[in-house]
Image (cartoon, rainbow, N blue to C red):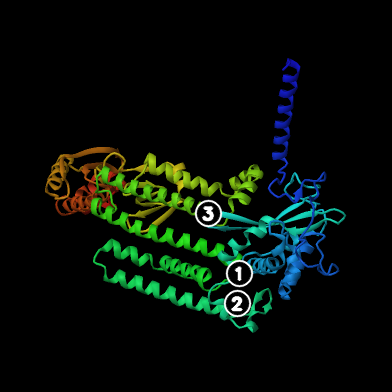
Amino acid sequence: MSISSSVRKTNTLRLLRLLVCACAILSVPFSTPAMTQGASDAWYETEAINQGLPVGPDDRIDRTAPRQTLRGFLNATEQGNFGAAAHYLNLADVPQDIQEERGPETAQKLSSILARQVWINWRSLPARPDAMIEHSSDSSARAGQPRRNLVIASLETGQSAYDIRLARYKSADQPAIWLFTPQTVDNVDVLFAEFGPRRYESRIPASLKREIAGLWLWEWIALPALCIALLFAGSMTRSATLWLASKSDRTWLRKGLDRSGLPLAILIMAGLAQLVFSNVLSFSGPVQMILRPVLIILMVWGVGMTALRLLDAALHRITIRYVGEIDDKRGVDERELYTSIYALRRLIVLLMVGLAVIVVLARLNLFESVGLTLLASASVLTVVFGIAGQAVLGNILASLQIAFAKPVRIGDSVFFEGDWSYVEAVFYTFLRLRTWDHRRIVVPVTYFVSKPFENWSVAEARMMKVIDLRLDPCADVDELRDCFEKLVKDDPEISESDSANTRTTDQSADGLNVSFYAMMDDPSTGWTVQCRLREQLMAHIRDNRPNWLPRERVEDVHARNNPDRRDPQSAGTVRMAGSG
């Protein structure tokens, strides 16, 4: 064999490979011998269409456009003319000798599937023979081009998804028509077994199967009755949950069950409704389209909220057992544990919300449509959500910052904008502060972290308390120092009596400012002891040295100029002033 012939053979093989790749890209239907790819992209060319069916009344069968094909199919099935409805199917994969038998049967099953699972959007179905997209709001690449294949609906059974499609076919010397695809015809049996009439639906009288306002007459009767039954089941579930809570000996379980009554009731109601739709009655497409996503969302919400309520009760039990009540008397490690538990709860909530969104999107098959839309308009959505949710997202991030950096912990004693309070709780968007007089201050997290505040428990709960007294200049500070040290030693709530100290911190014409210092174990105890020591010091001065109280002296000018006329009773006249 010469070199030139070898080269020609190699080139021929390469050309064949290119042709195979091109055919794969163009999706040539090699599996159906009766159907071949035409030169036009407006239809599929086929040798013959449904030769096994009897000739139908062509004047009544309009298959020129997708909308006309679907409308004609539904009208024929509603009239019970399944033989005419079979002419809207492409029975290319059905042997010719049994098409007359299988065609009407398949049409009846397909009409049942469409009635129960598909809510048809007639506006989205083209009325043009070429199904061209004339106007597109999402800048579709197919805008202005003819189409030959449309998806009417996509139904999922188990782990598989099946499409119901219309396609345009043209045989020799015949105009192009729209039919349900051979793949749709092949999938009818599987879809009918999954979504066809349920076991009790055959007992419904024919008089109740008339359509009124888009729904069957029996649906207008069954839906209110089903709602009443579900409400009764939900009420019984909630009552049973509360009864179990009252019988429980464990406090955390009792609180968890008590708060889980409503989520459990909604979960049971949604689950029972799903069982009715799956095994008892099969409602029409509009009802399915509305109730199916609602039931899925309610079931996911019920499971998530029930688990979260029980988790909250368990975390609260752990907190009470290992930490105790919220105050600054607990150690730093205990307050950090309490804060970490709250942070763990917030992370669990975020994970549960994310998981719930993923489950709902997956169950409703929204990943494709929603995902592509989000990707197509990501920049616009980023700006919109960034502006609309700036405050919420900022508060969530700030709360996570508090949870991990811990500038304040739950139970810390803080002085914020003139109020001494405890950090009682840290939520996603706000903090709850409990003041010393048991008021509650709710502060947005971003506002709290952007303002300076005093954390009296950041390193330790101990703090130095100061008692200031304004006294007369003649007061003996050493005597007061001895009295204060004795009071501190005798006070049972002061553990560091050696820290007591007394200093004269100011002096003016009005008198002396004497400051008494004592170390307190925590701010709450310190405030109580501070008030008690102030009362004891004032009682000592009042009972033993009343002349040390601040006084305003009045000088008699006439008596100073005339000593002989001085009134002995007026000497040393004073006017008392309040203590500082």
In the image, residue 397 lies at what x, y percent? 47, 44
Q: Nearer the viewer, residue 25 or 259?
A: 25
Residue at the image position 31 percent from the left and 54 percent from the top: 315
Residue at the image position 86 percent from the left and 56 percent from the top: 174
Under circle 3, the secondary element is loop
Instruction: Residue lying at the far right in this picture: please name it.
Output: 173
Q: Is residue 530 left or right of residue 82?
A: left
Q: Amino acid at mark 1?
A: Val
Q: Amino acid at mark 3?
A: Gln
Under circle 1, the secondary element is helix
Q: Which residue is mark 3?
A: 159
Q: Which residue is mark 1?
A: 287
Q: Nearer the viewer, residue 56 or 202?
A: 56
The answer to whether residue 548 is visible is yes
Name which of mark 2 and mark 3 comes first in the sequence. 3
How many angstroms separate mark 1 from mark 2 (CA)? 9 Å
In the image, residue 29 lies at what x, y percent? 71, 46
Name which of mark 1 and mark 2 comes first in the sequence. 2
Above or below residue 314? Residue 561 is above
Mark 2 touches mark 3? (CB < 8 Å): no
Under circle 2, the secondary element is helix
Name which of mark 1 and mark 3 comes first in the sequence. 3
Mark 1 touches mark 3? (CB < 8 Å): no
Mark 1 touches mark 2? (CB < 8 Å): yes
Q: Which residue is mark 2?
A: 219
For the N terminus, the image quarter is: top right
Q: Nearer the viewer, mark 1 or mark 3?
A: 3
Q: Amino acid at mark 2?
A: Glu
Q: How many C-alpha atoms fall within 10 Å of the one at disc 3: few (<14), some, or many (≥20)?
A: few
In the image, residue 132 lies at what x, y percent? 80, 52
Q: Is residue 364 left or right of residue 500?
A: right
